Image (cartoon, grey):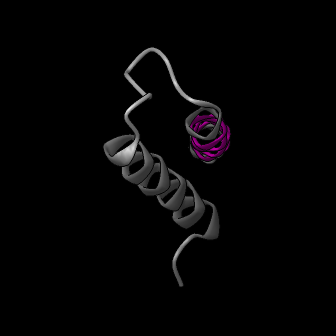
Amino acid sequence: MPDDLYQRYQAAHRAHQTHSTDCTHCTDRVRCPEGQRLWAAFERLQDAYLKRQRNTR
Protein backbone atom coordinates (compact mmCIF):
# COMPACT_ATOMS: atom_id res chain seq x y z
CA MET A 1 0.00 0.00 0.00
CA PRO A 2 1.40 3.42 -0.96
CA ASP A 3 2.50 5.76 1.80
CA ASP A 4 -0.33 8.27 2.37
CA LEU A 5 1.97 11.12 3.44
CA TYR A 6 4.15 10.60 0.38
CA GLN A 7 1.09 10.54 -1.89
CA ARG A 8 -0.24 13.79 -0.38
CA TYR A 9 3.20 15.41 -0.67
CA GLN A 10 3.43 14.48 -4.35
CA ALA A 11 -0.15 15.60 -5.04
CA ALA A 12 0.60 18.98 -3.47
CA HIS A 13 3.64 19.31 -5.71
CA ARG A 14 1.61 18.47 -8.82
CA ALA A 15 -1.11 20.95 -7.81
CA HIS A 16 1.45 23.72 -7.39
CA GLN A 17 3.12 22.89 -10.70
CA THR A 18 -0.21 22.90 -12.52
CA HIS A 19 -1.15 26.23 -10.98
CA SER A 20 2.20 27.90 -11.69
CA THR A 21 2.09 26.74 -15.31
CA ASP A 22 -1.29 28.42 -15.86
CA CYS A 23 -0.92 31.47 -13.60
CA THR A 24 0.45 34.64 -15.16
CA HIS A 25 1.23 36.20 -11.75
CA CYS A 26 3.36 33.47 -10.18
CA THR A 27 7.13 33.37 -10.59
CA ASP A 28 9.87 31.47 -8.77
CA ARG A 29 10.00 34.20 -6.12
CA VAL A 30 6.56 35.82 -6.11
CA ARG A 31 3.27 33.96 -5.89
CA CYS A 32 -0.36 34.98 -6.09
CA PRO A 33 -2.50 34.15 -3.03
CA GLU A 34 -3.61 30.81 -4.49
CA GLY A 35 -0.07 29.95 -5.55
CA GLN A 36 1.21 30.83 -2.08
CA ARG A 37 -1.42 28.60 -0.47
CA LEU A 38 -0.45 25.68 -2.72
CA TRP A 39 3.28 26.26 -2.12
CA ALA A 40 2.78 26.41 1.66
CA ALA A 41 0.84 23.12 1.59
CA PHE A 42 3.61 21.53 -0.49
CA GLU A 43 6.34 22.79 1.88
CA ARG A 44 4.46 21.61 4.97
CA LEU A 45 3.90 18.11 3.57
CA GLN A 46 7.44 17.85 2.20
CA ASP A 47 8.90 18.85 5.58
CA ALA A 48 6.71 16.30 7.38
CA TYR A 49 7.67 13.54 4.96
CA LEU A 50 11.39 14.28 5.12
CA LYS A 51 11.31 14.54 8.91
CA ARG A 52 9.65 11.15 9.13
CA GLN A 53 12.22 9.69 6.72
CA ARG A 54 15.08 11.01 8.86
CA ASN A 55 13.49 9.63 12.04
CA THR A 56 13.09 6.12 10.60
CA ARG A 57 16.79 5.73 9.76
Q: Which residues are magenta?
A: 37-49
Residue extending furthest toward the top: 29
Q: Is residue 20 left or right of residue 48?
A: left
Q: Name the quarter where the C terminus is drawn.
A: top right
Residue 26 vs residue 56, the one in the foreground: 26
Picture coordinates of residue 9, whole percent (x, y): 55, 54
Residue located at (50% from left, 61% from top): 11
Q: Picture quarter containing residue 8?
A: bottom right
Residue 50 vs residue 34, the one in the foreground: 34
Q: Picture quarter containing residue 34?
A: top right
Q: State whether residue 27 is above or below residue 48.
A: above
Q: Picture quarter containing residue 38?
A: top right
Residue extending furthest toward the bottom: 1
Q: Is residue 33 left or right of residue 16?
A: right
Picture coordinates of residue 40, whole percent (x, y): 65, 35
Q: State whether residue 7 is above or below residue 30.
A: below
Residue located at (39% from left, 40% from top): 20
Q: Name the quarter where the N terminus is drawn.
A: bottom right
Q: Is residue 27 left or right of residue 11?
A: left
The reply to whether the magenta stretch includes residue 16 is no
What's the magenta bit mostly, secondary-structure-wise? helix
Q: State whether residue 37 is above or below residue 1.
A: above
Residue located at (47% from left, 46% from top): 16
The reply to whether the magenta stretch includes residue 41 is yes
State how many labels appear.
0
Q: State whether residue 43 is above or below residue 15.
A: above
Residue extending furthest toward the front: 24
Residue 50 vs residue 27, the one in the foreground: 27
Residue located at (65% from left, 32% from top): 33
